[in-house]
């Protein structure tokens, strides 16, 4: 993060022909982009969207309203261009890359033991790192994995404490009895792994999933390459949030795309100090919110780079 | 509004490869567009942005942080392409048209008497009607007028009652004493016009301004032509809201673009039953929020028209 360029970007915002601060979050997003890109004129023209897919052993317990085979079916749908994220990448101009992680080998049931071996988890992290392009103006991250809102709730509870029920939501559409059952399984998981959640890696390995570890790996790699990141919704944010338990500033190069309907996301975003860019009651995943948020960043960049200053336009300043 | 096409649009949303409702407000926006456009495949490709500008007699009393000449200076800035709305129309693909209404002839001071004669107000309404294109997929409306947040607060209080202080905000940047002074002037206006605010036209004429009457005229004309409308922020919404005092459904073809920082806007949107598409702490006006909201509509349309159904994609449905 280049603080000097951030300060210059703020000064430019304050010189543009509008009351100071009147573009609100658009101003903050432009300044954030400038400082993380290290450029006076930020850009999001080269946008890259990564959707990681994985399967979860706990899905066999019926924690989702959809059967586990939907993960692979949706990956096929992504490849054929029929999913929401295909349309949203097209309209926002992002390049879409889908990375499926060993879908025929689900993780183990995290309510009974670790979801992954250390080797599995390390490999998934590396897949995430390897998927990040050498250069991009902005990286959008998302996921697909039947059962992974169960993992997201467990990761959040492990990282930040609090009652499991406050982190757990209906996901793709559980009813109340399904939700109670899901909460109970996550509580079993918390008991099972109690005292062993001693590092970000152990949290991811025990309670995560391959696509979630890949997200964490991509977030780390993007930071090293100076690429700002848009995290999609609850599940994606929870996967990335694990990194803050190792380094509090680990997500400073990330924004949260939108406030998910999944109830744990509001608290999670607040804990991370992130203001979601959008609040559209979305809860789909697959980076859908990130792609819509990219359009807001395009607006922020257009204003920042294109507007005239008071001096240039000959407009009188504040009395 | 074509209810049959709206029902078909909802049925299509429920057949697409995502959990039902998981695209939240995007789904509702697509269905709203389809029903108002009367088309199974809604479009926002042909987007037209109208920014009306007017001057206010009450500006001479110092109700704004900026001098009144800024209205004309900003119109020049619009014409030269240096303002926020120029960049936002470019990035969103909307055609921008700026209509200045007799800027060298401010309205009269609404705290002391009617802002406009009946002829003036009727002419401004007609200017608004005349500015609406014969055809467009979507119309964005916005305003520029130093002092017009004072008018917006007065219009809101006249339409919906409540304490003047709850409708009044800092506008472009008043401090607390400036805000108290502004509230006092609006209270004077309410006393002055008490019992004479008997129709939408009288409310607009007495407490509005030319650009606000033009917005109301454009909203009426768009309805006649079957063009859905995006209202920008507080001032634009308040001008349009006057029409609901004559016919409660007058704004059913309109969406509110964003929740303004101006404090009255939240209550106003709630009274109108409108959920602002965005909440970005914007408070600039000039249709800036409407242009960003257009991008969200583009996302909603892309998903609605482009996604595969469960049957087409061979994806298993809800258990």
Image (tube, coloured by chain):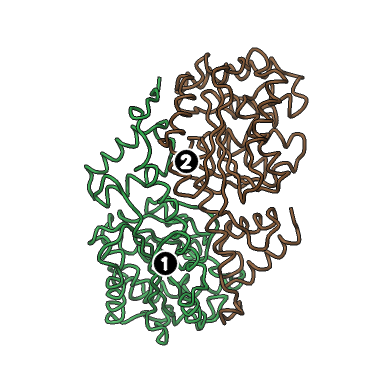
Chain colours: A brown, B green
Q: Residues within 10 Å of mark 1 (few under 14, many from 20)?
A: many
- Give coordinates of residue B17: x percent, y percent: 40, 32
For residue B253, what is the image quadrant? bottom left
Depth check: A264 or B33 in front?
A: B33
Separation of marks 2 and 1 at Cα, in angstroms: 26 Å
- Give coordinates of residue A9: x percent, y percent: 67, 64
Q: Which residue, as the protein is rendered here, is positioned at the far front?
A: A134
Give the answer, above or below, for where A165 lies relative to B178: above
For residue B89, what is the image quadrant? bottom left
Depth check: B65 or B319 in front?
A: B319
Q: Residue at x 23, y 61 (%)?
A: B225
Q: Quadrant of the C terminus of chain A?
A: bottom right
Helix, strand or loop at label 2? It is loop
Q: Residue at x 48, y 68 (%)?
A: B86
Q: Marks 2 and 1: same chain?
A: no
Q: Which residue, as the protein is rendered here, is positioned at the far bottom?
A: B104
Q: Which residue is mark 2?
A: A281
Chain holding disc 2: A
Q: Which residue is mark 1?
A: B142
Give the answer, above or below, for where A234 lies relative to B250: above
């Amino acid at each position: 993060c280049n603080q000097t360029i951030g300060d210059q970007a703020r000064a430019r915002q304050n010189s543009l022909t509008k009351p100071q601060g009147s573009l609100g979050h658009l101003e903050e997003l432009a300044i954030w982009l400038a400082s993380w890109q290290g450029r006076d004129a930020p850009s999001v023209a080269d946008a890259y969207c990564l959707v990681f897919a994985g399967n979860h052993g706990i899905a066999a317990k019926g924690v989702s309203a959809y059967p586990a085979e939907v993960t692979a079916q949706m990956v096929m749908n992504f490849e054929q261009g029929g999913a929401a994220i295909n349309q949203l990448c097209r309209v926002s101009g992002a390049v879409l890359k889908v990375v499926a992680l060993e879908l025929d080998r689900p993780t183990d049931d995290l309510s009974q033991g670790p979801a992954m071996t250390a080797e599995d988890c390390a490999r998934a992290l590396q897949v995430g790192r390897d998927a990040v392009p050498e250069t991009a103006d902005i990286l959008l991250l998302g996921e697909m994995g039947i059962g992974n809102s169960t993992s997201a709730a467990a990761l959040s509870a492990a990282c930040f404490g609090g009652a499991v029920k406050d982190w757990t939501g209906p996901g793709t559409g559980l009813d109340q009895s399904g939700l109670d059952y899901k909460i109970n399984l996550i509580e079993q998981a918390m008991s099972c792994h109690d005292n062993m959640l001693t590092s970000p890696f152990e949290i991811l390995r025990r309670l995560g999933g391959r696509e979630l570890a890949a997200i964490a790996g991509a977030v780390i790699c993007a930071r090293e390459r100076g690429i700002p990141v848009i995290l999609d919704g609850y599940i994606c944010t929870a996967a990335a949030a694990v990194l803050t338990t190792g380094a509090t500033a680990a997500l400073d190069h990330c924004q949260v795309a939108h406030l998910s309907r999944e109830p744990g996301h509001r608290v999670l975003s607040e804990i991370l100090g992130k203001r979601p860019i959008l609040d559209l009651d979305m809860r789909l995943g697959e980076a859908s919110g990130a792609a819509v948020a990219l359009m807001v960043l395009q607006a922020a960049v257009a204003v920042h780079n294109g507007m005239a200053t008071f001096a240039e336009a000959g407009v009188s300043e504040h009395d």
